Amino acid sequence: MQYAILCYHDENVVCAWSKEQDDAVMAKLAVVQEKAVRQGKLGPVARLLPTTAATTLRKDREPAIVIDGPFAETKEHLLGFYIYDAENLEEALAFARELAEVNPGGSYEIRPVGVFKDGKQAP
Amino acid sequence: MSDTCRINAVISSARPRVVAALLRHFRDLDLAEEACQEACLRALRLWPMQGPPRDAAAWLIMVGRNAAIDAARRRQRLTPLPDEDAISDLSDNEEATVERLDAADYRDDILRLLFVCCHPELPATQQIALALRIVSGLSVAQIARAFLVTETAMEQRITRAKRKIGNANVPFEAPGAVERSERIAAVAGVVYLLFNEGYTSDVAEQGARATLCEEGIRLGRLLLQLFSVEPEIMALLALMLLQHARADARFDAAGQAVLLPNQDRSRWNPNFIAEGLALVDKALRHRRPGPYQIQAAIAALHARVARAEDTDWAQIALLYGALEQIQPSPVVTLNRAVAVSKAEGPAAALDMIEPLCEQLDGYFYFHGARGAFLLELERPGEAKVAFDRAIALANTPAEAAHIRLQLDRLAGAPRTGDAKKERVKNS
């Protein structure tokens, strides 16, 4: 089963990290990720730009409207995600716990993946 | 990252909201600052044990408010005549405070706080110093270091600024729509000035001053969260990110300034560039052009090309032309001339700046650029005069060193030397 591990954090806090603090967190995360890559379990990983760079397309009215900013005003923002191939939820949780140990604050949402297309297949 | 680092980051990101809310409550800059300080001290003591609260800003505001009220009560026991007006909403319970802390309040509070710092009666340096002290919470020593003055002098500067604001009787009411649009421009201006203070610094000052660039970017992000549909604020943040992306490449190991065409572009920060370009894209979609958008678009054209020789100088010259229309200034014309010299050659550029001779006579970059155009036109005698004038006006050792390099080249190189090679490369 593939799991999407969605990374949430308070953007104000993450953006207030100095470059050194950010680099240190990224270096520690890289160690955890590398292990999963060697096991062949890690799919695409993405870190998203801050929500201030986001644009939302609202489909709930006709015609759909484009608005600046993220989908919802929340305390914690979706900052990135992992695709992780695990036997079961326990294993996915174990990986998320390892990530959490080296990444202060925020939270991870673990969601089973329904459909996954890597975008590379020919049509 | 340790707990202390994390708590510091939480506090510094919450600080503008906290001081802003406390200022609205107490209507006194010093009192608001002290209350915030006290709340932060308590947070540093309690949070490592309990963990930071879910809403750090609300916690700090409540604790700061209560601490200041307690302190005021203690003082009142010693001095008669309690000042009821100084402390408003004494009857507010905590729940109401938290309820009031919605996004709309933050927005008005921080805007007001920044606006207080941008009071038109204060000179720009005092505005920036006050914003750094009040909004960003930098210590007087840090600010003094950034401005290369003694701590005492900076303390005086800030005290004077506060007194002037106290005397001016700044209204604390919620700003109307017109005032708000005026304020946002003033506030954006101070954030940009703050960033520029850091950006125009010498390599020797980089340590102390890089903080100013980072602080400018942080405040830019905050402003954009408050005004998420303002293309000019998107562009302001984009501009700062794109400029700051080059920070590591702007000086060589010896501390000499490295000009844009000679910079090692692999040392530009790709994350800042990605975010900056995304914001420029988003801003331009609004089709409401403004000076920050044009400047950001120019910075984006530089950031998009992998090699200096691929730079689209004709487009940059057009953008400077547009900026000249919106915001006429001899400095903008000078910049347009530099772009024109690359796109059309130095003769056109020199014609363009000759009328500025009088206005920009005391401006380092004018004589530096003029010297470069003359050098390219193979008029070494006049070029030397211009460079001599530039060196006398240099603001930093790095600027002086750069001009000296040009003078050395002028003295050493054969008459048709480097200038011609340069032309071929740029064409």
Image: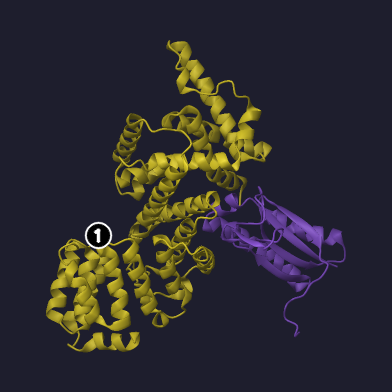
Chain colours: A purple, B yellow
Q: Is residue B404 left or right of residue B243?
A: left
Tell me: residue A56, above or below residue B372: above
**Residue type at tag 1:** Asn
Residue closest to the eye, B334 or B263: B334
Residue pointed to by mark 1: B395
Q: Specify the quadrant that holds the N terminus of chain A.
A: bottom right
Image coordinates for residue B18, horizontal then vertical, percent: 53, 37
Q: Quadrant of residue B344?
A: bottom left
Write the residue at 25% across / 64% down.
B330
Q: Is residue B71 left or right of residue B400?
A: right
Q: How many residues crowd mark 1 within 10 Å: few (<14), some (14–19), many (20+)?
A: some
Tell me: residue B64, above or below residue B211: above
Q: Quadrant of residue B411?
A: bottom left
Write the residue at 70% across / 61% down.
A59
Residue closest to the eye, B410 or B381: B381
Tell me: residue A73, above or below residue A118: above
Q: Residue furthest right?
A: A88
Q: Is residue B246 left or right of residue B123?
A: right
Q: Specify whether residue B138 is in view.
A: no
